[in-house]
Amino acid sequence: MSAMGNPTNIFWHECPVVKTERQKLIDQQGCVVWITGLSGSGKSTLACSLNRELHSRGKLSYVLDGDNVRHGLNKNLGFSPEDRSENIRRVGEVAKLFADAGLICIASLISPYRKDRDACRAMLTDDNFIEVFMNMPLEVCEGRDPKGLYKLARAGKIRGTAGFTGIDDPYEPPLSCEIKIEQINGICPTPCDMAGQVVSYLDENGFLHA
Amino acid sequence: MSAMGNPTNIFWHECPVVKTERQKLIDQQGCVVWITGLSGSGKSTLACSLNRELHSRGKLSYVLDGDNVRHGLNKNLGFSPEDRSENIRRVGEVAKLFADAGLICIASLISPYRKDRDACRAMLTDDNFIEVFMNMPLEVCEGRDPKGLYKLARAGKIRGTAGFTGIDDPYEPPLSCEIKIEQINGICPTPCDMAGQVVSYLDENGFLHA
């Protein structure tokens, strides 16, 4: 704190409320759960069911969805390689702010390139970045095709300069991630099972209490 | 909710946790407190003391500071008119996300132009954007000059294409704002008084309970 020279000047208080104080208030630890995987791999479904499960446990979480953010913060970005990279960087920066605010921030983006995800990881301390890889076979994702994008991609009708991830642009799976969501004996886990897997991780690693 | 065609496909649950549910969890209402004013007018001081006061009342708030954000989310922006405008737009979009998450988001930026502030207001419902105008005389701000920027500006040593707000670039005061912070009989309010003024507004308008 520094006092300024005359009475009309205010004192300059250095009194920031720090992350640990916010965490204590809501009894949880801020972090980023980063869900990556192909279109149709179940990212949004997991984000949604995880958010619901955390809420039912009294925990404050918030979903940053790649598609939704493109309507707001990132509406001035297109689909060139640079813009896709900037799209991910901005979501990473915002996720970092949410984690600092004490929330469990659930980011759900294809984020196909390792370097973009690793750059987001590097924004946080390593413990607070929990990478969840939706390890679903392309055939399963393409079979679901919830947005009809694979059909468009196969027909060569996807806009933009970049290819479509999984079809004509690579998806680089994490080399080491905190959580993998996979089929068991060819059966996909339910939304509830997927959320349960992440919640168990968060619980075991102390994130559900301050 | 729509069921997909085969058993390996998941159900597509539409189960988002909505703002009102998050608000109930933490017993408050998400909003944006947008603090605008000249450099040295006390924006950061108010942001800090408001954040502290809200925390002491058990309320979850978070400060988005114009300078800090330029080290992260907005580090790829300079000081051209377009970049300053984009700087404010991004902070507005992020503040909107924080308000949607249920937090009282305190944004502290010079934000000299009415149109930029009004664009941020337009992102939210009108009730949830609380504009706080630091109505301090230029002489007071320049007398404080906490960052030494006025001295540089007067000496013509400020970088960038844009001028320095208050010296060679205009500050456009709000035409109608929710809160004005002003001197009384030539005396500046203390940080505590300023925070109290905003907290009273939030309290009277129902933001401190869900």
Image (tube, coloured by chain):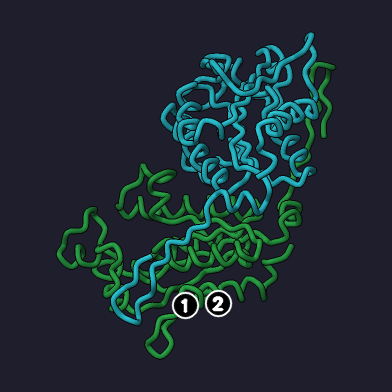
Chain colours: A green, B cyan
Judge the density around disc 2: few (<14), some (14-19), many (≥20) Cα neighbours within 10 Å.
some
What kind of element bears circle 2? helix
The residue that mark 1 highlights is: A181
Tell me the quarter of the picture where residue B152 sits. Answer: top right
Answer whether residue B45 is visible to the viewer in this image: no
Answer whether residue A102 is visible to the viewer in this image: yes
The residue that mark 2 highlights is: A197
What kind of element bears circle 1? strand
Q: In x, y percent, where is residue B105? A: 61, 40
> Label 1 lies in what chain?
A
Residue at (35% x, 50% y) in the render: A83
Whether the residues at callouts 1 and 2 have beta carbons within 8 Å, the answer is: yes
Q: In x, y percent, where is residue B87? A: 49, 35
> Label 2 lies in what chain?
A
Q: In x, y percent, where is residue A197? A: 55, 77
- Mark 1 vs mark 2: tell me if same chain: yes
Instruction: Give the amino acid type for the residue marked by disc 2 in the picture.
Output: Gln
| Viewer-nearest residue: B13 or A166 | B13
Q: Earlier in the sequence, mark 1 or mark 2?
A: 1
Image quarter in which the N terminus of chain B is found: bottom left
Q: Could you tell whether A9 is left or right of A85 in the image?
A: right
Instruction: Give the amino acid type for the residue marked by disc 1 in the picture.
Output: Ile
Residue at (48% x, 55% y) in the render: A64
Residue at (72% x, 52% y) in the render: A22
Q: Residue furthest bottom?
A: A185
Q: Residue furthest left?
A: A155
Gap in angstroms between the C-alphas marked 1 and 2: 8 Å
Residue at (78% x, 43% y) in the render: B57
Q: Is residue B133 above or below residue A102?
A: above
Q: Is residue B164 above or below residue B207?
A: above
Give the label on residue B24, or none: none
